[in-house]
Amino acid sequence: MLNLKYYFYSILLLSSFTILSCHKHDDDDLSGTGTLEIEFDHKANGQTFAFGQDYVNESGETMQFTEFNYYVSNFSLVKSDGSVYTVPKDECYFLIREKADGVNTKISLSNIPAGDYKEFKFTIGVDSLKSTSPAEQRTGALDPAGEAAGMYWAWNSGYIFVRVEGTSPAAPLDPGTNSNKFRYHIGLFGGMNSPTLNNIRTVSLKDKHDDVAEIRKDHHAAHLHVFVDIMDMFKSPNAISVATNPTVHASPFSANLANNYMDMFVLDHIHN
Amino acid sequence: MQLSVNFLGLMVFCSILWTSCTVDDKDLWTGIVKPAHFPEPFFKVEVTKEGFELGRKLFYDPILSRDQTISCGGCHNQSSAFTHHGHDLSHGIDDLIGMRNSLPIQNLIWHNSFFWDGGVGHIDLISINPIENPVEMDLRFGQAIAKLNTDQNYREQFKSVYGSDSITGSLFLKSMTQFMSMLVSADSPYDQYLSGNSNALSAEEIEGMKIFESKCASCHSGVLQSDFAFRNNGLQEEPFIDDGRFLISQFEQDKGKFKVPSLRNVEYTYPYMHNGNKNSLEDVLHHYRFGIKKSSTLDSLLIKNGKLGIELTDEESSKIIQFLKTLSDPKFIRDKRFSEQ
């Protein structure tokens, strides 16, 4: 009996240690900076996304995808106390490409001031200032001769924010490729000296259980696991039919897709 | 005797100085000089002699086209102020015909957008457009840069200009910008008149200038004769064959609008308009007097008291044309610095 009681207490003690070790404390050192990692996990109708798989959209059409790329940029992070840290712009233009190997793309934001962060905001696309910047600022993900190939419009100088292509029996036959192709290339940053349609959209993510990302110096990165469901692009409020709109590039209709895809990002959980 | 030796010495010294100046014209390099009567340029561009020369070489090199048949200079001829002489719609690769009349390349740093529809918003980005256009040079930009990187001469030249023999898209674009932004035309009789030489224009040309200022300069304003706005000047009926600015902005109200062109060297840049369907300045004036087509986006300045067009007499029209010819800058179209070497 004594033995059992001892055993019980020791379990209790052990559990409380475990709980304590899972949570960092308020007396944590909040000096210095740390890193935030964001993983973009592509989904389709809630399933793991893969090229060449059949997915049915809200209009009942079967779609197979061959390309799924998008830009995310202009990150700002909101702390629990409401204060905002804006990540220096030039450090954060990322081109996320779905790759055939199915490995999720992770991006890393470093030098984030230590603290607890509850909200994560970013832009889908590339802002107007960067879109009209001189050639020397177009490096890395923004180099039209390099990584940005296929994500840049020369005739309407600006980046394609979201590029989705594939085939569907519902799409009309494309004479160029002799296949039933659909192509959605959504761009347009609003113009600089003369206005254009503005398809820049901002996403704001929060954890559904109000968990926070704990950024600390000398600690591994806090990690956001973000689900991105491609089929949300075709869902209400602007259900897109591949049969009716197989190709959308620069057009007034493109705003419907932009309004749809701003909701495709969901923060599933946070690892600290 | 002492004096004359000194004098001779001085002479020799001076002639060495002189020779060194003429032999090494790097010392004479001025970069872009803003004409005193021009406004501040919209784009500030640093141009070095080496960067300019590299840009010039690229401008005249067909390596930038898919099948090495066509260069920038092939359609942008210096003799017609760097537009496609005598072609209504410009020809490109495989003799395909472009959608619009090519624009002259001159005084670009004063423009705030490029092409008829203003689709390009930065001077550095101009050349990606014709390189990638399937009816112009038909290469992906990355392919063009890869081709340049296989050329040892270019690698060496880029190294001597920029210190790196790895040719990037950015360095290529900077070179093109350096060449194109040097193409400044500011020495026409009109410029000389504005700079204080009152004899540069005849009495009739001055009269033409005044009529132009009162009848045309609401849109063709300033020393570059453009407000750089997008306007519908009554060339098309609805539905428009070419939606112009709408293709860029996607705003209904921009349908059928095009950027107001500068009129510098207009005598050399025929045919006229976005579709090149006016062959002479007489045709252009005739259009504005009698040919305006009504449409929902027609510029309100082209309707007066319910009547379409600009009210002008024959005499006024011909004086305007005389004035427009004073915008010709023969030195610009013969400047050897800008020619294929």
Image (spheres, rainbow, N blue to C red):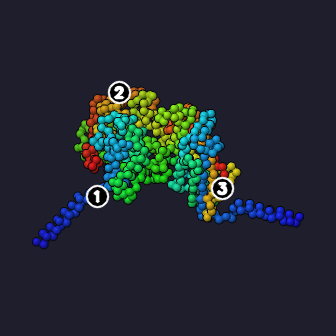
- Name the residue at 33% across, 40% down: B75
Lower sequence index among marks 1 and 2? 1
- Label 2 sits on a secondary structure element that is helix
- Tag 3: amino acid: His
- Tag 2: amino acid: Phe
- Name the residue at 32% across, 39% down: B84
Residue located farthest toward the left when viewing the structure as drawn: B1
Label placed on residue B26: 1
Q: Position of residue A5 (x, y in %)?
A: 86, 64
In the picture of the structure, the residue carrying the numbered disc 2 is B290
How far apart in space, not on screen, are marks 3 and 1 (Cα)? 61 Å
- CB contact under 8 Å: marks 3 and 1: no
Mark 3 or mark 1: which is in front? 3
In the picture of the structure, the residue carrying the numbered disc 3 is A271
Q: Residues within 10 Å of mark 2 (few under 14, many from 20)?
A: few
- Label 3 sits on a secondary structure element that is strand
Question: Tag 1, which chain?
Answer: B
- Label 1 sits on a secondary structure element that is helix
Query: Is A93 placed left or right of B171 in the picture?
Result: right
Mark 2 or mark 3: which is in front? 3
Q: Quadrant of residue A112?
A: bottom right
- Name the residue at 39% across, 35% down: B99
Residue A116 seen in the figure = no
